[in-house]
Image: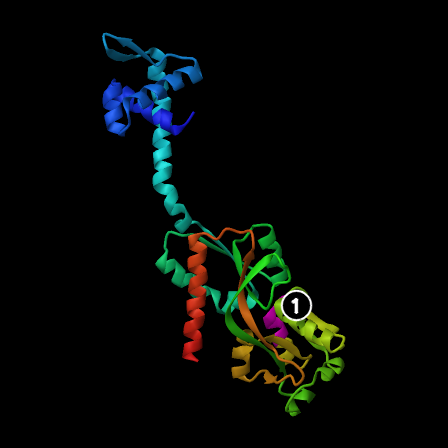
Amino acid sequence: MTIRHLRIFAAVYQNMSITKAADQLHLAQPSVSLAISELEKYYGIRLFDRMSRRLHATEVGNKFYGYALHIVSMFDDMEKNVRDWDLSAALRIGSSVTIGNCILPPLVRRFNRTYPDIQVTVSINNSATLEQKLADNSIDFALVEGLPSSPALVQIPFMDDRLCLILSPDHPLAKQDTVRLEDLKSCPLLLREQGSAGRDILESIAAYHQIPLSPSWESISTQSIINAAAQGLGISVLPYLLVKNALQEGVIIEKPLKDASLSRKFSIIYHQNKYLTRSAVNFIELCRQSADLSSAAQ
């Protein structure tokens, strides 16, 4: 049984005429008669009495009309509104700490101004946790630093970024023009927690050069690491965007790392089997446009 059958029945009931219903629905009269017969046969009921060449609804036909009208109305309402759901679907965005602090807030504000009816929720965490959330489908996509570890994730680079090696102006290494990877062996290291993108990059570089890393200070708080570095408790490698203010204030300084590049890219990642709604596609496009404007301004 289909919506078509119910729609035909409702038209016949409202007109009490096969001919008028056929004209209203732009169907042939035999098609309308067949649909009514199929309904009656399917449910084992009689919907109309045919007397003196006129139709009269039976008692069960009257009851059936209430159901049919409700179902057809609900279906028409769904047809009318469902086409907008994809555009107005809520967004569940994941973000790494750096992007969540420095990049995402103005992006969400711009998006909200353009699409005020779309609800946006944000989850800020380290990259490893965000990848798990994508696998669990608890977020739609994520803005992360560096490369995803899972081959099931699609990556769209959208902005250049870099890490920087920071230390106190009074640190012994502050007198050097550059810092070597070998120098990391003899200095206390202040690092973010395992799973953060910046730490993953530093550990990959160190592993490639066969240099063991053993942090003396480990924190999920970037600010606590900056404060520890400013007090001369060790050196750290952190995203430039998160240490920019401290560098400008002079509480810490930056030194180039001689043996490796600390450049990286911000990326949008999502699961390869995830359907991106038009809302998601529009937000991703906004990210790319903002990155283009930022590059042009530099």
Please provide percent x and percent y for residue 116.
36, 55
Q: Quadrant of the N terminus?
A: top left
- Colour mode of the rendering: rainbow
Q: Main secondary structure of the magenta part?
A: helix
Using the rendered view, name the quadrant where residue 39 is placed. Answer: top left
| 100 magenta-colored | no
Please provide percent x and percent y for residue 117.
37, 51
Instruction: Please state which of residues 79 and 139 is positioned toward the viewer in this rendering.
Output: 79
In the image, is residue 133 above or below residue 146?
A: above
In the image, is residue 235 above or below residue 84?
A: below
Instruction: Please state which of residues 280 and 116 is positioned toward the viewer in this rendering.
Output: 280
Instruction: Please state which of residues 2 and 97 is positioned toward the viewer in this rendering.
Output: 2
Q: Is 210 placed left or right of 191 in the picture?
A: right
**Amino acid found under the numbered disc labelled 1:** Ser
In the image, is residue 62 above or below residue 183?
A: above
Residue depicted at x 48% and y 53%: 276
Identify the residue under disc 1: 219
Please provide percent x and percent y for residue 134.
58, 54
Using the rendered view, name the quadrant where residue 291 is placed. Answer: bottom left
In the image, is residue 71 above or below residue 249?
A: above
Q: Is 165 placed left or right of 278 in the picture?
A: right
Residue depicted at x 56% and y 50%: 137
Outermost residue toward the top in this view: 52
Please provide percent x and percent y for residue 186.
76, 82
Residue depicted at x 37% and y 47%: 84
Q: Which residues are magenta?
A: 220-226
Using the rendered view, name the quadrant where residue 149 is placed. Answer: bottom right
Q: Quadrant of the C terminus?
A: bottom left
